């Protein structure tokens, strides 16, 4: 269910396609994609086995994500 992501985008005053969501679970990734947002899948060692195949980008270290590198997806 993408509702939480859509409500958040609306409260921020931005379109969903201008947003990036970060999730560590398969249902969360599906929700972000259903909302029409760019999705970063976070391989959290505490989340067990998850399917990250729908995520646009997958990482196990959030500190390696550079905002400047993501901008190309929204220009």
Image (tube, grey):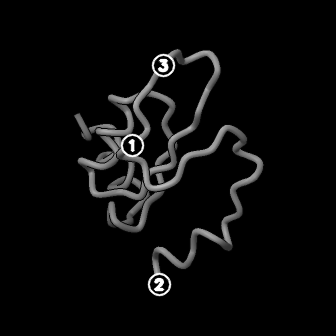
Question: Badge 1, how many Cα within 10 Å: few under 14, some, many 20+?
Answer: few
Which disc is residue 49 wearing?
A: 3
- Residue 5, percent from left and from top: 35, 44
Name the side, left or right, on which 72 lies relative to 30.
right
- Residue 36, percent from left and from top: 28, 57
Looking at the image, which is closer to me, 54 or 72? 54
Q: Residue drawn 27% across and 50% down? A: 35
Looking at the image, which is closer to me, 43 or 8? 43
Check if mark 3's residue and mark 1's residue have beta carbons within 8 Å: no
Q: Residue drawn 37% across and 55% down? A: 9
Count of number-bearing discs: 3
The disc, 3 or 2, on the residue closer to the chain's N-terminal end is 3
Which disc is residue 39 wearing?
A: none
What SS does tag 1 mark? loop
Looking at the image, which is closer to me, 12 or 69? 69
Residue topped by disc 2: 75
Gap between marks 3 and 1 measured at Cα: 12 Å
Q: Quadrant of residue 16?
A: bottom left
1 vs 2, front mark: 1
- Residue 45, percent from left and from top: 64, 20
Q: Residue drawn 58% across and 68% down? A: 70
Q: Quadrant of residue 65?
A: bottom right
Check if mark 3's residue and mark 2's residue have beta carbons within 8 Å: no
Task: Reply above or below: 26 against 35.
Answer: above
Gap between marks 3 and 2 measured at Cα: 34 Å
Residue topped by disc 1: 53
3 vs 2, front mark: 3
Q: Residue drawn 75% across and 52% down? A: 64
């Amino acid at each position: 269910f993408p509702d939480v992501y859509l409500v958040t985008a609306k409260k921020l005053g931005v379109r969903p396609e201008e947003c990036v969501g970060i999730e560590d679970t398969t249902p969360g990734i599906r929700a972000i994609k259903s909302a029409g947002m760019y999705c970063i899948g976070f391989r959290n060692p505490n989340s067990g086995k998850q399917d990250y195949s729908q995520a646009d980008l997958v990482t196990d270290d959030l500190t390696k994500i550079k905002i400047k590198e993501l901008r190309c997806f929204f220009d």
